[in-house]
Image (cartoon, rainbow, N blue to C red):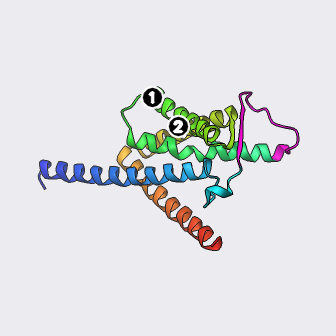
Amino acid sequence: MSATKFKRKENAMKRKSNCLVTILFLIYLALLVWIILFKLQFSISDLDKVRSINLIPFHYDKEIGAAFHLTEVLENFLIFVPMGIYLQMLLPRTKLYVKFMLIAGTSFLLETMQYILAVGRSDITDVLTNTAGGLLGLAVYSMAARLIGNRIKANRLFSILAGIVSVVVIGLLGCLLFANR
């Protein structure tokens, strides 16, 4: 195979991979909005009408136990790890501070929307933990790509993992939807 044919074939594979990653990222964003804004509810009328804001990091009401808060912090942290990974895959040449701003901005936007729509408690702790999770995702991807030694192979690995996780999550949500009919 000539060098130009090989290069064309490689470019076609990159485009297909980028298309798949973009689709998986859009699915992730839709799930993220559904989880954060709509609390996995299928009906808007089932949502609690709560509008509150907390601007003191890691400050909680005493009525709710510490274990709940630790779980919530961990969930907020982990739910944004994929965002960092996706941003590394989709925007490989973009500067770190821009990716940081995209992660923090997305979290801030979702928290603001919770307040505006009165569908949850807006909390600076959520913004901080979401952003930290996204930064971990950036680091995980970078370390994996460095260990593998090739961004294309790293993208392929993360695309396969993201595809599997997406199918499992959508399947579980489908079961949840079917069970709540």
Q: How busy is the neighbourhood of tag 2: few (under 14 within 10 Å), some, or many (20 plus)?
A: some
Q: Is residue 60 above or below residue 169?
A: above
The magenta stretch spans residue 26: no
Query: Please, which residue is most extreme toward the front here?
Result: 45
Distance Cα–Cα, label 1 vs label 2: 12 Å
Quarter occupied by residue 171: bottom right
- Of the numbered discs 1 and 2, the one sitting upstream in the chain is 1
Q: Secondary structure at mark 2?
A: helix
Which residues are drawn in magenta?
49-67
Q: Is residue 170 above or below residue 108?
A: below
Which residue does the image show at 73% across and 29% down from the upper left?
57
Q: Which residue is mark 1?
A: 98
Q: How busy is the neighbourhood of tag 1: few (under 14 within 10 Å), some, or many (20 plus)?
A: few
**What kind of secondary structure does the magenta stretch mostly adopt?**
loop
Circles 1, 2 touching at the beta carbon (< 8 Å): no
How far across and how far down the image is residue 39, in percent?
A: 65, 53
Q: Tell me the kind of residue under disc 2.
A: Thr
Which residue does the image show at 64% across and 73% down from the upper left?
179
On residue 106, which mark appears? 2
The magenta stretch spans residue 66: yes
Quarter placement of the N terminus: bottom left
How far across and how far down the image is residue 103, in percent?
A: 52, 35
Q: Tell me the kind of residue under disc 1.
A: Val
Which residue does the image show at 88% across and 38% down from the upper left?
62
Q: Going by the image, does 141 lie left or right of 50?
A: left
On residue 42, which mark appears? none
How far across and how far down the image is residue 49, in percent?
A: 70, 47
Q: Is residue 73 above or below residue 44?
A: above
Between residues 110 and 119, which one lies in front from this camera angle?
A: 119
Q: Nearer the viewer, mark 1 or mark 2?
A: 2
